[in-house]
Image (tube, coloured by chain):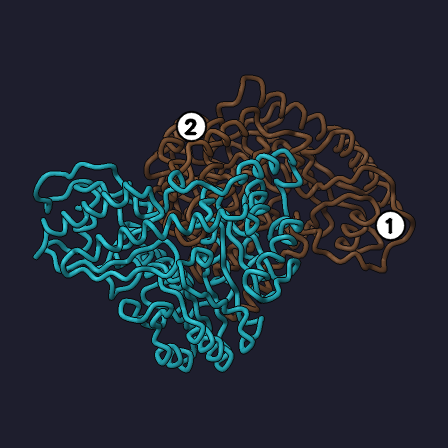
Chain colours: A cyan, B brown
Amino acid sequence: MSIATKFGRMATDNAPGQEVRQSDAVDFLKGEPLPGRPVDFSHGDVDAHEPTPGAYELYAEGFAKGGAQAYTEYRGLAEIRDSLAARLAAFTGAPVDARDGLIVTPGTQGALFLAVAACVTRGDKVAIVQPDYFANRKMVEFLEAEMVPVQMDYATTEPGRSGIDLAGLEAAFKAGVKVFLFSNPNNPAGVIYSAEEIARIAALAARYDVTVIVDQLYSRLLYTGIDYTHLRAEAALSPDNVVTILGPSKTESLSGFRLGVAFGAPAVISRMEKLQAIVSLRAAGYSQAVLRSWFAEEPGWMEARIAAHQAIRDDLVTRLAAIKGAVVRAPDAGSYLFPRMPKLVLSPIEFVRALRLQAGVIVTPGTEFSPHTADSIRLNFSQDHAASVAAVERIATLVERYRA
Amino acid sequence: MSIATKFGRMATDNAPGQEVRQSDAVDFLKGEPLPGRPVDFSHGDVDAHEPTPGAYELYAEGFAKGGAQAYTEYRGLAEIRDSLAARLAAFTGAPVDARDGLIVTPGTQGALFLAVAACVTRGDKVAIVQPDYFANRKMVEFLEAEMVPVQMDYATTEPGRSGIDLAGLEAAFKAGVKVFLFSNPNNPAGVIYSAEEIARIAALAARYDVTVIVDQLYSRLLYTGIDYTHLRAEAALSPDNVVTILGPSKTESLSGFRLGVAFGAPAVISRMEKLQAIVSLRAAGYSQAVLRSWFAEEPGWMEARIAAHQAIRDDLVTRLAAIKGAVVRAPDAGSYLFPRMPKLVLSPIEFVRALRLQAGVIVTPGTEFSPHTADSIRLNFSQDHAASVAAVERIATLVERYRA
């Protein structure tokens, strides 16, 4: 495959955070821009929801330590891995091997890339949920592997379930899938997999000897009444067949430090480290020090953060549901809303541009997550509460302006 | 190719910085350990040669900026790229396009990986100098491309020249090489390419339409009387055929922030950003702020840093040259020494282990850089002056202990 073909499938034109590179010269707008404070729903606002208290002080201590914190093992400083392993084991309900089963990476994206590239080679079949995190598909394409899509009926399933097509998943495994990669809570739909769904995934992976990479980035941000099941604690699944991805970039607002972790199958972690050696060597040395506070936040801090997000969620869901013809499901976890828009005279991509240019609102188009969700938009609602409510009201105004 | 085969060729057992993962149980030692302050020559000591003044304060300002510095374009914050582009153009003698021709990456390793993976796909021929930076070969192997080695007679060539086999390079290009990847100053040999060598490389790359990726990580640390030629300023070479890699991690001791840059061919930089989107998203947001001081250090600071390194270099070269049968060339640039050891009763890898276990000295074995340099060891002499002199004296003592 030529470089041009390979990279042609990895477009970032509509990727979250890249909007600044788009041209403003378009000819499909009508009416005047709407006044209001701009809101960038493509990612969370770490000014509205600040980094965990003490994070910066830990960074400063790390810098003061000098070379010992600047240069660590490629998989991260041993002492930090030791303390993290115990906390991650308690959180997920299964042992974590600090020496051989845990790696610190530059961001959760770094962990995901290394995990996928350490398990998938050219021609391998990889099961990917639709919709799911937009980079999953692109990593499979970069590795010249074959994506086997599995559908998820997130919009109509009951709370606490994802609606994944388990028969479709088994068919994919039966057809020779080697790796199953999925996010739980799901990004963009905000649903979580029920205990039954996780048990079934574990049983299927064991039966067909599939390695599972589960991206649990939002698994700490669970709303009232929601139970979460950790795949790696399932007895049916061999610890050698599962790698879990987590990081402090979202709920904890530590994204600017670029930190992630992967933990699980030692053979996979070992290959990930070999790859990290040529991809980035290690997570930023001083940044690693910030992990000392992770899963050790002050009592009540996480509860307050969840409550703040739940309140925003509820206000935005109410306003989105009031748009005639829109379909919105309240997320069980995480900070994403993924409403389906009614029929408009603009194409979905044109509408996303119109939101940016006329409403001061940046959202991510649904096509980034699945070919079947073009009429949805993704909003990361980890934002200033009042500003995000006003922004969603502007979205509603533009829907009416462009309604078909 | 299976995952096991692919990763089997990417071993990090002897990679610099990974020594802590080696077993201490060996049976080939004789005699007692030597007393003395341990020295880790596998990388520079940022406690002995501290980060650029003001670097930490810039980081603190970046953190205080919050979301605007935490979340940047994948290729780095535009305002930082703007100021860097002007400085990099002045340094290298050719224009740098801040918008489309420059990307900020997690470390120089990140820049190298993205550049190579954005230019090389499976089966492509890539010319690699022997010896050269140990990751070059591994990146080519990860991409399932074909390495075409080109020899460099660094030990006997005159100062200011690398001794690259230009006839061998042309033969490689003629045989269909698509990409030429090399470090200048060379890591590990510490030689630089002369104006004539660079002009010839440019002419050959133009003639055979080869893309050149040049890793100039040490190009600011030039010793007395040495001239440096920037490949990208060569008129013969199309700007679309060259990408330059640089970073503040070495001479400036900013490694703990993990920052690098690549600049040059816009089409390559664009592919690199697409790949960064799935590999790590971006360099750590707050860390990017540290680049504001890069190439804008206080007057005299760089001169003092170079003088300190030149003094260490001279003392170590004198002591290594006094070892009977050792071959050492004083580096023209950078902070690496790559002496060849005399014949010993231990294998080269055993001797490297003996140095660690009996002399408290960590060095990197020559096999990491070329199959033809097994009897050499690499020392990064960016260390405490007195401690590194004492450490080299211990190396000399162990050479006598194990001399064949």
Q: Is residue B185 visible?
A: no
Q: Residue furthest right?
A: B31
Residue in view at x 65 percent, y 23 percent = B307
Please tell me whether mark 1 sits on a helix, a strand or a loop.
Answer: helix
Closest to the observer, A274 or A184: A184
Q: CA distance from mark 2 to mark 1?
A: 49 Å
Q: Is residue A136 left or right of residue B317?
A: left
For residue B93, the mark is 2
Q: Residues within 10 Å of mark 2 (few under 14, many from 20)?
A: some
Chain bearing tag 2 is B
Q: How many marks?
A: 2
Residue in view at x 12 percent, y 53 percent = A346
**Mark 2 touches mark 1? (CB < 8 Å):** no
Please report whichever mark, 2 or 1, sits nearer to the chain's N-terminal start.
2
Q: Position of residue A98 (x, y in %)?
A: 64, 58
Q: Which residue is mark 1?
A: B402
Quadrant that contains the N terminus of chain A: bottom left
Q: Position of residue B306 (x, y in %)?
A: 62, 25
Closest to the observer, B272 or A102: A102
Q: Amino acid at mark 1?
A: Tyr
Q: Is residue B165 left or right of residue B65?
A: right
Q: Amino acid at mark 2?
A: Gly
Please tell me whether mark 2 sits on a helix, a strand or a loop.
Answer: loop
Chain bearing tag 1 is B
Vertical comparison of A375 with A282: above or below: below
Q: Which of the 4 quarters of the picture holds residue B391?
A: top right
Quadrant that contains the C terminus of chain A: bottom left
Q: Which of the 4 quarters of the picture holds residue A95?
A: bottom right
Q: Position of residue A175 (x, y in %)?
A: 40, 81
